[in-house]
């Protein structure tokens, strides 16, 4: 998966980025404010558990994503999709109260600033295809397999 970069505001985790391994190291940030240290340590601990295969929902984290009211609603609903399960973009649109907004849901997923923790990877196309993923389809495929999802589309190999 490569290195991850985490970004925090005074109110919580605001972004998670997958970094390219060949990218130059991130500049060393200033020491975080004392009130954020427990959150930072919790995020690191939970992400380590996640990558060790422990089903993790990240529900206890205080998040501070930036987005439109619709995007925030979509991202909030994404956090309710359990480990190893997927739903379609259309189903997610229904869950946020706008059944005809599957494209808008897809666009909200595409700009999700906190992938993994806000699990946009758990949303797939209605026919069972992967759909899109802002961090790349190879990562989406890996994360879904890591969570135990088994692709079952006849004639399609993932």
Image (tube, rainbow, N blue to C red):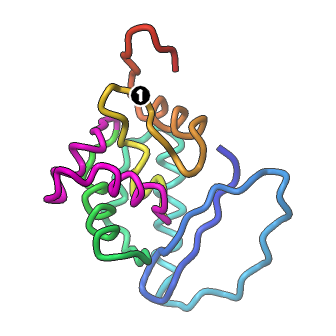
88 with respect to 137 (left or right): left
Q: Nearer the viewer, residue 101 or 143?
A: 101
Looking at the image, which residue is at 83% across and 58% down?
A: 23
Label count reads 1
User: Could you tell me residue 111's position as x and y percent?
Assistant: 48, 62
Query: Is residue 157 one of those drawn in magenta?
Result: no
The magenta span reads 84-113
134 with respect to 22 (left or right): left
Q: Which residue is mark 1?
A: 129
With respect to residue 112, does 102 lie above or below?
above
Looking at the image, which residue is at 20% across and 51% down?
A: 100
State which quarter of the image contains the N terminus.
top right
Residue at the extreme top of the image, as rendered: 155
Looking at the image, which residue is at 32% across and 26% down?
A: 127
With respect to residue 29, does 132 lie above or below?
above
Occupied quadrant, residue 62: bottom left
26 with respect to 54 (left or right): right
User: Could you tell me residue 89's position as x and y percent?
Assistant: 30, 44
With respect to residue 87, does 34 lie above or below?
below
Looking at the image, which residue is at 33% across and 55% down?
A: 105
Q: Nearer the viewer, residue 95 or 141?
A: 95
With respect to residue 119, does 132 lie above or below?
above
Q: Secondary structure at mark 1?
A: loop
Q: Nearer the viewer, residue 72 or 131?
A: 131
User: Could you tell me residue 133's position as x and y percent?
Assistant: 51, 46
User: Could you tell me residue 55's position as x and y percent?
Assistant: 37, 42
Query: Is residue 93 one of those drawn in magenta?
Result: yes
Q: Residues within 10 Å of mark 1 (few under 14, many from 20)?
A: some
């Amino acid at each position: 998966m490569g290195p991850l970069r985490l970004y925090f505001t005074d109110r919580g985790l605001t972004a998670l980025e997958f970094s390219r391994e060949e990218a130059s190291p991130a500049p060393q940030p200033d020491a975080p404010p004392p009130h954020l240290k427990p959150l930072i340590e919790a995020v690191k601990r939970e992400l380590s558990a996640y990558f060790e295969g422990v089903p993790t929902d990240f529900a206890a984290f205080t998040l501070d994503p930036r987005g439109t009211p619709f995007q925030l609603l979509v991202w909030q609903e994404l956090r309710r999709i359990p480990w190893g399960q997927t739903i379609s973009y259309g189903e997610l649109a229904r869950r946020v109260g706008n059944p005809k907004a599957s494209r808008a849901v897809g666009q909200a997923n595409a700009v999700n600033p906190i992938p993994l923790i806000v699990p946009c990877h758990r949303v797939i196309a209605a026919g069972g295809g992967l759909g899109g993923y802002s961090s790349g389809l190879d990562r989406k495929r890996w994360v879904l397999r890591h969570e135990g999802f088994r692709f079952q589309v006849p004639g399609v190999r993932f």
